[in-house]
């Protein structure tokens, strides 16, 4: 069995702090006097000679659950974790295999503030091998068989209602109907949320996505519109928690919504994100792109720099660049050459795991297609409709059929790639058969 905790017996002074604090013991009724309870049921026990010993069969970490209690309470620095639980394991299992989506969840999961996002996560601090980054990674192949298979079975996910929606006064930078920004701004004004994790752009690099924690409608309005690069927006959850926000909305791509779910459902109490997420808005997405690729393509095909661009948009088979000197339509295939590698493994087009899903497919220009998936989303939508902030008409069968067709084609592409997953099981081995008729 893999070692989940290492105890240095030369450093250990036998104080018993780890034994008392160990949740593996607490859940089995060991009293707080030092772990002299029924030995076989305690993860950490004090041996007869006074040293602390670990029973791997009971240790929460060896059950792949996040826990670092014993290390945190040890006054002698005698508890460490083996390096197969460290950032290097995230690199090996996910990043170097090209399946990392760049969601930023590992940044918020890391208790040491040791990870930062560039196009991919990078280790910038000291890794203590706690294992949180890999455990909370939505692309960790060892952990997420259920997530991969769940996603495959159902192309569109649970739908309560579907609408074409246009804001009465859409923000000038809105991508489609401005629904996302107008809804969030209103929820902020009403105090239903107190902050939103969204994606703006870097000051020094126009149209390069950057994660933003917006706490006012003005800040939100700045972030309207799609940036076709990765922000790793989930990294902002850590900031939201540190700044004391209690009701946070998250806007993200399907991969980011999956990452959110991983953090949300974490069994680790010290992450605590499940208590602060008030709403998730997932965007439709066929794929995201590397910033340098988008930049070079725009400059080469339009003769202008991104600083002069007013809007980027993907509709049908074209990537449209609207600049002060006119519009340019670039065949989508040219942009697809710069698609992020990890997007090829994603089978979710409509962000199935969110409260609201929003895209453009299914609605005419200047409208957002909005799928309502939860009762809290339904209440929020009714609020903005009743206040006259948006105009909504139900999606018809043709609209839904189009969305379903695109969703199925994304599943098909992902299945092909997952079946050739490097050094891993095939989809069939994972117990997943094709969900497509
Ligand atoms: C990379 C990408 C690919 C997409 N692909 C499709 C597609 O194939 N088909 C489709 O129908 N729709 C797609 N969309 C969604 C579509 O472009 C609009 O975002 C959606 O219709 C909402 O429009 P709106 O006017 O309601 O949003 P707005 O009010 O304009 O708000 C847009 C929101 O999107 C967020 N956002 C912007 N860029 C990013 C980013 N890079 N990562 C995470 N969040 C971001 C902002 O934070 C903002 O909250 C994609 C969006 C992105 C960012």
Image: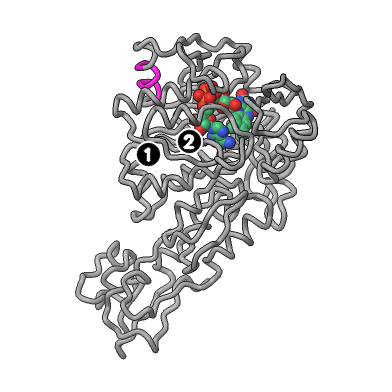
Asked which secondary structure carries label 2, the reply is strand
Residue carrying label 1: 277
Which callout, 1 or 2, points to the residue nearer the camera?
A: 2
Q: Which residues are magenta?
A: 377-383
Label 1 residue SS: strand
* Relative horizontal placement of residue 199, taking residue 403 as reference (left or right): left
Looking at the image, can residue 155 be seen?
no
Residue neighbourhood size for the residue with mark 2, other residues' Cα within 10 Å, grouped as few (<14), some (14–19), many (≥20): many
Residue at disc 2, CB closer than 8 Å to ligand 1: yes
Identify the residue at horizontal 58%, vertical 39% (top origin). Answer: 209
Question: Quarter-wise, where is residue 237 in the image?
Answer: top left
Tally the marks.
2
Q: Main secondary structure of the magenta part?
A: helix
Residue 108 seen from this side: yes
Residue 206 picture location, percent across and down = 61, 37
Picture residue at 47% right of the left edge, 69% below the top? 128
């Amino acid at each position: 069995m893999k070692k989940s905790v290492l105890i240095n017996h030369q450093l250990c002074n036998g104080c018993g702090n780890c034994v008392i604090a160990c949740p593996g013991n607490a859940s089995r009724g060991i009293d707080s006097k030092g772990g002299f309870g029924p030995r076989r049921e305690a993860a950490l026990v004090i041996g007869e000679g006074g040293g602390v010993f670990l029973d791997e069969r009971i240790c929460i970490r060896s059950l792949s659950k996040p826990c670092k209690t014993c290390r945190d309470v040890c006054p002698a620095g005698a508890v460490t974790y083996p390096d197969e639980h460290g950032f290097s394991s995230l690199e090996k299992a996910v990043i170097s295999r090209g399946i990392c989506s760049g969601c930023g969840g590992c940044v918020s999961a890391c208790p040491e503030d040791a990870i930062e996002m560039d196009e991919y996560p990078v280790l910038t601090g000291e890794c203590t091998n706690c294992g949180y980054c890999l455990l909370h990674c939505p692309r960790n192949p060892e952990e997420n068989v259920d997530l991969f298979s769940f996603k495959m079975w159902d192309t569109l996910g649970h739908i309560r209602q579907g609408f074409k929606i246009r804001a009465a006064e859409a923000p000038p930078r809105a991508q489609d109907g401005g629904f996302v920004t107008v809804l969030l701004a209103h929820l902020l004004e009403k105090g239903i949320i107190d902050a939103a994790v969204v994606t703006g752009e870097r000051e020094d690099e126009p149209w390069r996505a950057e994660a933003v924690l917006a706490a006012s409608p003005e800040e939100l309005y700045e972030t309207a519109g799609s940036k076709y690069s990765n922000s790793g927006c989930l990294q902002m959850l850590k900031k939201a928690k540190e700044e004391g926000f209690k009701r946070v909305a998250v806007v993200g791509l399907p991969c980011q919504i999956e990452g959110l779910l991983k953090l949300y459902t974490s069994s680790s109490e010290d992450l605590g994100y499940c208590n602060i997420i008030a709403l998730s808005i997932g965007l439709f997405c066929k794929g995201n792109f590397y910033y340098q690729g988008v930049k070079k393509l725009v400059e080469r095909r339009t003769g202008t720099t991104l600083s002069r661009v007013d809007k980027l948009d993907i509709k049908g088979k074209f990537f449209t660049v609207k600049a002060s000197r006119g519009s340019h339509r670039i065949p989508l295939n040219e942009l697809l050459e710069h698609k992020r590698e990890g997007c090829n493994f994603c089978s979710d087009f409509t962000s199935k795991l969110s409260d609201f899903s929003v895209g453009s497919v299914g609605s005419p220009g200047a409208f957002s297609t909005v799928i309502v998936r939860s009762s809290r989303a339904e209440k929020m939508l009714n609020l903005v409709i009743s206040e006259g902030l948006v105009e909504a008409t139900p999606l018809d069968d043709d609209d839904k059929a189009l969305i379903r067709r695109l969703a199925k084609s994304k599943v098909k592409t992902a299945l092909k790639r997952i079946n050739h997953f490097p050094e891993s099981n095939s989809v069939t081995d994972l117990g997943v058969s094709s969900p497509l008729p």
